[in-house]
Image (tube, grey):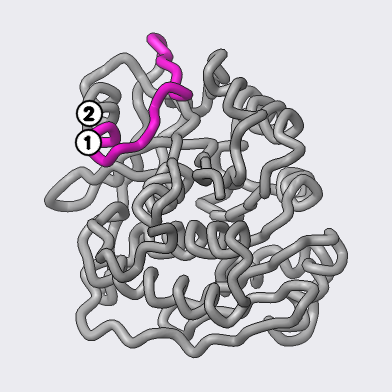
Amino acid sequence: MKQLFIAGLGEILFDVLADSEEIGGAPVNFAYHAGRLGADGAAISTLGDDDRGRRATSELMNRELCLSGVSIDREHATGYVEARLDDQGVATYHFPDDIAWDHLQLNDTAMGFAAQVDAVCFGTLAQRSEQSRKAIQTFLDAAPQALKVYDMNLRQNFYNKEIIADSLQRADVLKLNDDEIKVIAPMFGLKGSEREMLQKLHVGFELKCSVLTRGDKGSLIITKDGEVDHPGIEVKEISDTIGAGDSFTASVAIGLLLGHSLEYISDHANRLAAHVCSCKGAMPAIPAELKLIK
């Protein structure tokens, strides 16, 4: 079997915490975890020509991510977000406007990736600007063979029904959490239980796989072959939850590409996310026993 090539398309930013700055952004977190699970992971984004941009490049290269699809914007600052953690380690975010990933540019290498990737993950946040939204759509349209993973990732007020619906129409896999499904329920006329709402999205947008994460209450995954409701993995001591959902998404994407059973996919994704919650930051080291591609 050929080596899997998996990309995260969208924002790279620093999570600015009370005592530190941690590199992150949902798409690059996804790409990192795909790489740690045994695939070749690549980031497709835009950084500023500044200290944070240079630090992001250095830190991501040290994490063995391919960055040749990352462009440099000399007019706008590298992205960052102020992240605040509650007593349970759950983060809330505040994003500044008009930074480098709002001006996402697809360089020649990034466009070359479109014909090669086995899976690509994208979200809603990076589509808040028209330029970045068009760049994301251009890449997705140029990658008909790729498993397209839409991690809804709703933040602040940077979303609307049009962007979400277009993303769902382009996606093969949907991942959202239990807060997000409540937010979009009135947009799409979703009613009933979480399972019923997820099933309606799954069928209505002809998705291959739909994933609902519920924090410490586990997850629900639906495909044409069935569904698995997982109760979750207890984490004795949560450090923070940053990146846990992105690791879950990477695990599901690789599991689908490898043809694993839905039960195995669900269990591995929950175990991996629990591990990430026990560590600081979005990109911790991953134990060898959690690697999917040996």
Q: Quadrant of residue 182?
A: bottom right
Residue farthest left in this picture: 19
Q: Is residue 180 placed above or below 268 in the rendered structure?
A: above
Residue farthest front in this picture: 1
Residue 94 visible? The answer is no
Quadrant of the drawing holding the C terminus = bottom left
Determine if the magenta segment contains residue 60.
yes
**What residue is drawn where x is 53% and y is 86%?**
230
Return the residue at label 2. 58
Q: Nearer the viewer, residue 54 or 191?
A: 54
Q: Is residue 204 placed above or below 38 in the rendered structure?
A: below
Return the residue at label 1. 62
Residue 135 disc label = none
Q: Nearer the viewer, residue 290 or 107?
A: 290
Magenta range is 59-75
Determine if the magenta segment contains residue 288.
no
Q: Quadrant of residue 280?
A: bottom left
| x and y, in percent, of residue 13 in the image | 36, 37
Q: Nearer the viewer, mark 2 or mark 1?
A: 1
Mark 2 and 1 residues: CB-CB less than 8 Å, in contact?
yes
| x and y, in percent, of residue 153 in the image | 54, 54
